[in-house]
Amino acid sequence: MIKVKVPATSANLGPGFDTFGLALDLFLTVEAAEAIKTSCRFTGEGQDQLNQEEEENIIIKAIKRVFREAGETAPDLALTVNNQIPIGKGLGSSAAAIVSGVLIGNELLDKKFSHGQLINIAADMEGHADNIVPAMSGELTTVMEDDKTVYYQKIKTPADLKIIIAVPDFQLPTHKSREILPEKADIHDTTANLQRACLLLASFFNGDFSLLDIAMDDKIYQPLRKQFIPGFDEVLNQARAAGAKGAALSGAGPSVIAFALNREEAVGQAMQEAFNKNNVSCRIFYLNPNHTGAVIF
Ligand code: HSE
């Protein structure tokens, strides 16, 4: 039997669209055992909506993809899945499912592929690497893709960093959140985002969050995406007023991520109240960074 545990991830962190990703201590756990017929049993987040049919199941698709890359056919498997990651909320649930599948497939193939090769396969399945890499490797990662190869660096996250995530009760499909993005960006906005992205990375590298708020102020994507999130500006403003060091849309949304060094409960409460005021119910998750990435037992 193979067991894998893969963390949730929050991508972009404001200016780092398709670039930054942070691993969170919220997990998808999958157990796989060889069986006569492929099956999948889900518990946890999304258990009623996740498709358990073999041809639609992302975990099984990823296992089969790794076998295909190896020129082999995947065996039938009985999967037991426990999922803590909210689905369709901008917390990397599909990346976690893909990563769990490629890791299980690779174990069944006696570790035929390297960590880097698995990242390339998983990123190709997902369409972008910003959630895949931190799900595999943990911590804050910055990725670059060139000619179907993923390059990345990992930055150790400070131990005292508190992460607050407001998860609204509606889903925002990633394709809907990407469809509205422009083909081309203004040079001034692009420069502003590049400056902010570098400032954000340096802030994490130095463990100095005094400029994080302005560093997370994305000029290109959030201004367009916020139309899908009632009360978005108010949630960010209230988070800051309650003591957050910075806040942004988590991935493609609709969740909002905020960072704090203390008073995290006041930040969470302020974010929840702001969403409620805009007729959106939400859950608040108090999390820490995940340092290890996916683990195989
Ligand atoms: N970088 C991606 C986006 C993350 O913002 O669309 C969501 O998968």
Image (cartoon, grey):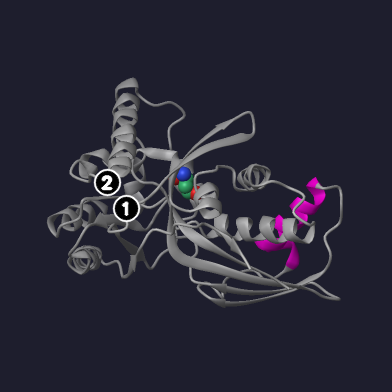
Q: Residue furthest top?
A: 187
Crowd class of label 1 (few under 14; some 14 to 19; many from 20; radius 10 Å): some
Q: Is residue 176 above or below residue 27?
A: above
Q: Which residue position holds label 1?
A: 158
Q: Which residue position holds label 2?
A: 207
Instruction: Kindly identify the residue that appears in the image at 38 percent across and 68 percent down.
Output: 169
Magenta region, main secondary structure: helix
Q: Is residue 230 above or below residue 2?
A: above
Q: Which residues are magenta?
A: 54-69
- The quarter of the picture where residue 283 lies is bottom left
- The quarter of the picture where residue 47 lies is bottom right
State yes or no: Cβ of the residue under disc 1 lies below 8 Å from any atom of ligand 1: no
Residue 66 in picture, x, y percent from top left: 75, 51
Which is more N-terminal, label 2 or label 1?
1
Instruction: Kindly identify the residue that appears in the image at 72 percent across and 62 percent down.
Output: 60
Q: Dots 1 and 2: beta carbons under 8 Å?
A: yes
Left or right of 109 in this view: 114: left
Depth check: give the residue in front, 7 or 280. Answer: 7
Quadrant in which the N terminus is drawn: bottom right
Q: Is residue 129 above or below residue 287?
A: above
Residue 199 in picture, x, y percent from top left: 28, 34
The residue type indicated by label 1 comes to Pro
Quadrant in which the C terminus is drawn: bottom right
